[in-house]
Amino acid sequence: MNYQQTLAYLFSKLPMFSRIGSAAFKKDLTNTIRLCEVLGNPHHQFKSIHVAGTNGKGSVSHILAAVLQTAGYKTGLYTSPHLKDFRERIKINGKICEEDFVIDFTEKMQSLIEEIEPSFFEITVAMAFEYFAQQKVDIAVIEVGLGGRLDSTNIITPELCVITNIGLDHVNMLGESLEKIAFEKAGIIKQNIDVVIGEVLPETKPVFEKGASEKNAPLHFASEKRYVADWKHDHHQLHITTADIPTGAHENYTIDLPGIYQVKNVLTALEAIHQLQLKKWKISKGDILKGFSQTKKITGLHGRWEEIQQHPAIVLDVAHNEDGMKQIAEQLELSIYHHLHIIIGMVKDKEVEKILKLLPKHATYYFTKAQIPRALPEDELAEIAAAIGLQGKLFADVNSALKEARQHAHKDDLILISGSVFLVGEIDY
C-alpha cells in the first residue's frame, strides 16, 4: 500500500469516533494493551506527561511540548483529532511523522488489526507509542482522547499527570454531571505520581482529592499557586502577568496563542513545568519564555482563535462544547468589529441548544456541516437556532459558507468559523 491507500484502509476499516461517535469508543484498554504487547510495549521505553481535561488539554499539551523542546529535550507530542493531515497527531520536535512509518506500521500490524478489530484511536495510540520509542524521544506529551480512565492512552506511567478542567461534554459516554466526568478524567491519576489540576470547581475538587488520596498521588491545584494579576491582547499575542500566591512575586509572559481562554491554560502549564523542575528536568526561565512566546511556531498548533486573514478578519476556533463556547462569547465581547458573521457547524452528540444560546443574536449566521456522518445537518442546526432567535442561511459545506460571508463582509467585519474541529479542518486556506 502507498500512503493514501494506507490512510484509506485505516479510515474505512477501523471505527472512527470523529466520524461515527460513541459507537467507536471501546470501553476498556484490552485492545491497546494487546497491540502494545505485540510491539514490545513501546510506551515503557520513553518518559511521558499525560494531559486530560474537557477543554484546554490540546493547548496545554502544545505549550508543554514547546517548552520541553526549547529546553533541549527531544519531545514527542501525541494529540487528536487532526485538522488537515493524519500525521499531525504524531510529532517529534514539531515535525509530523513520516509517511513511510505510517505505511510500515500498518502493514506490520495488519494481521492483528484484522483479528482484534481495534478502533481507529486504539491503533493510532499504539502507532504513536511505537514511533516515539523508535525515535528514542526524551519525553512525550500525551493528550487524552476522550475521558481518561478508559482512554487508550491510559496505559502509560507518566512523570506527571495534568487535568486542565472539567465541563459538560460527551455526557452520553462520560456521565451527565460534573462529578461523574471528573471521576473519568481522574482515572489517569497513577500511584505515587504527581498530578496538576488546572481549573477546579466545588463539584470536582472532592473527586480529585479522593482519586489522588487513593493512589497516594501528590495533588497540586494550579489556581492555589498563582493567579493572573493582569493581561492584555496585542498583535495576535497575549501578554500575561502572573502573581505567586505565597510570595506575591510577579512574572510576565507572552504567548502566541491570543485567545483569552489561554490565560487559564498558562497557569496550568506553569504549575506543570514547576513540578517537572522539582523532578530535576532542566527547564530555565528563558526556556519557558521562549516556549510560551513561540508555542504555535514550534509545535504547529492551529485553530485556537487563529486569525487567517485581515480586512475582513477571519478567525478559526475549534470550540465545540458549552464551556468552549462560553469562552468564545467572552472573546467576542472584547473584539472590535463593525459587524459579526458566524459560520457554524456542529456534530449530533453535542448539547446544541445550550451552546447556541451562548452566541450573540446580532450576528449574521451561516449554518453548515462537516463532511462526516456524525455531523448535524445544516437544516436541523438552523431550526434549533431559529427557535432561540439566531437567523441565517444554509450551506452544504464550510467553504461555500465562507465564500458567501466574504462576499457580504465589510473590511472591518469579523468572520468567525467555529462549532466543530472537523469543520475548521475542512477550510481551504
Image (cartoon, grey):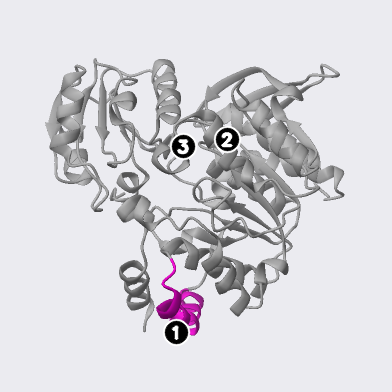
- Residues 405 and 139: in front is 139
Residue 135, numbered label = none
Q: Residue at x 31, y 72 (%)?
A: 8
Q: x, y percentage for residue 371?
A: 23, 52
Residue 189 location, quadrant: top right
Q: Earlier in the sequence, mark 3 or mark 1?
A: 1
Residue 182, numbered label = 2
Callout 1 amino acid: Ser
Label 3 – label 2 distance at C-alpha? 9 Å
Q: Earlier in the sequence, mark 3 or mark 2?
A: 3
> Which dot, 3 or 2, sits closer to the camera?
3
The answer to whether any part of residue 312 appears in the image is no
Q: Which residue is mark 3?
A: 175
Callout 2 amino acid: Ala
Residue 111, numbered label = 1
Q: Residue at x 57, y 35 (%)?
A: 182
Instruction: Report if residue 104 lies within the magenta region.
Output: yes
The residue carrying pointer 3 sits among few (fewer than 14), some (14 to 19) or many (20 or more) residues within 10 Å by Cα, namely some
How many dots with numbers?
3
- Residues 388 and 227: in front is 388
Instruction: Report if residue 228 lies within the magenta region.
Output: no
Q: Quadrant of the N terminus?
A: bottom left
In this view, 412 is above or below 270: above
Callout 3 amino acid: Gly
Question: Is 147 situated left or right of 413 in this image?
Answer: right
Question: Is 63 situated left or right of 98 in this image?
Answer: right
Label 3 – label 1 distance at C-alpha? 35 Å
The residue carrying pointer 2 sits among few (fewer than 14), some (14 to 19) or many (20 or more) residues within 10 Å by Cα, namely many
Residue 284 location, quadrant: top right
The magenta-colored residue range is 99-118
Question: Circle 2 — which element?
Answer: helix
The answer to whether any part of residue 355 appears in the image is yes
